[in-house]
Image (cartoon, coloured by chain):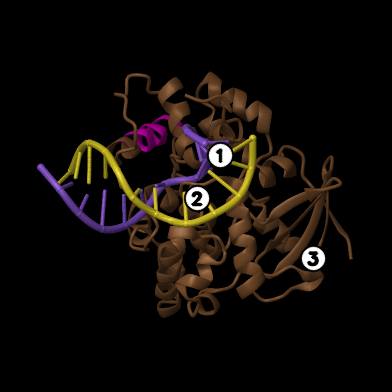
Chain colours: A brown, B purple, C yellow
Amino acid sequence: MEKALRLGPGNPFNLDATLGCGQAFRWEKMDGTWYGVAGDHAIAIRQEGERLIFSGADEPFIRRYFALDLDLEAILSSVDRDARIHAAIGRCLGLRILRQEPFETLVSYICATNTNIPTIKKRISLIAGRYGRRLQGGVSAFPDAAALAPCSEDELRGCVLGYRAPYACATAALCAEDPAWAQRVAALPYGEAKAELLRFPGVGPKAADCILLFAFEKYEAFPVDVHIRRMMRRHYLPDLPEDKTMACREYDLIAGFAREHFGAYAGWAQEYLFCVREEERS
DNA sequence: TGCCAGGTTGTAC
DNA sequence: GTACAACATGGC
């Protein structure tokens, strides 16, 4: 059954930017409607101006998942500190950082290293379809740690994870043994929470920052992927010495600069910059 | 075909 | 601590 939700004035929301920016991997748009899975909900949702029309979940879930409770204008005015981010905000106004499931986000970003977004979506979809609980409409929830932990490396290789299969396998086992991991991470401040996540195999600085930003509301996390690195070097830190691969020191330098420059909501700035990432290379 | 992709790991210095 | 090759796979 369809429900409708009216977005308040002065609190912008842009469904296309939010679901299309690459933070979540289980959404597809068809004929103006987004179809996807969040938690145990198979959701269909579309935006008509200031109205959201949705089915598959109740309004409190939608408000929470899409972070409609946050004062976006306040967040954006706090990071709006230069012409480039200002332009990005103008182009993607209403993009919000979702509140995603910790375990799904953890595994998703282990699957997201050194690859492209269509391939990540394929991996996540295969994992959910094979090991997740079936929902209405034929789609499946992402499995929890207990459901994924018994999988062998070969089974996960079958989900085209490649060399990441042992990492996902070992991480699922760790989470299954320690179901309170997410609660613990949630309670820690950014730096300590990141250190906790870095203990999972297959999780490095970038994946940890994505997980903290998309599943734990640690909004000072500033993930530095190849696009953001290129943009930051080109437009914010032109004096950084040339390097082929990203050294640990360089990552912390870029992310540290971003936190200083954009402030406590640097992660929101990162998503807006990622949303307008240049397609041109080199 | 060859290069690139929401990088991390293991190893050598 | 820093540097760098190896890594599976698919898109373009």
Figure check: A94 above or below A133: above
User: Is residue A64 highlighted in magenta?
Assistant: no
**Could you tell me which chain the residue with mark 2 belongs to?**
A
**Highlighted range, magenta:** A253-262
Find numbered disc 1 in the image and state the secondary structure of the residue it sits on. Answer: helix
**Mark 3: which amino acid?**
Gly
**Mark 1: which amino acid?**
Glu
In percent of width and height, residue A25 lies at 63, 53
Asked whether residue A97 appears in the rendered view, the answer is no
Identify the residue at image location x=61%, y=74%: A131
Q: Disc 1 marks which residue?
A: A271
Magenta: main secondary structure equals helix
| Residue A213 circle label | 2
Q: Disc 3 marks which residue?
A: A56
In percent of width and height, residue A266 lies at 47, 38
Q: Is residue A51 left or right of residue A71?
A: right
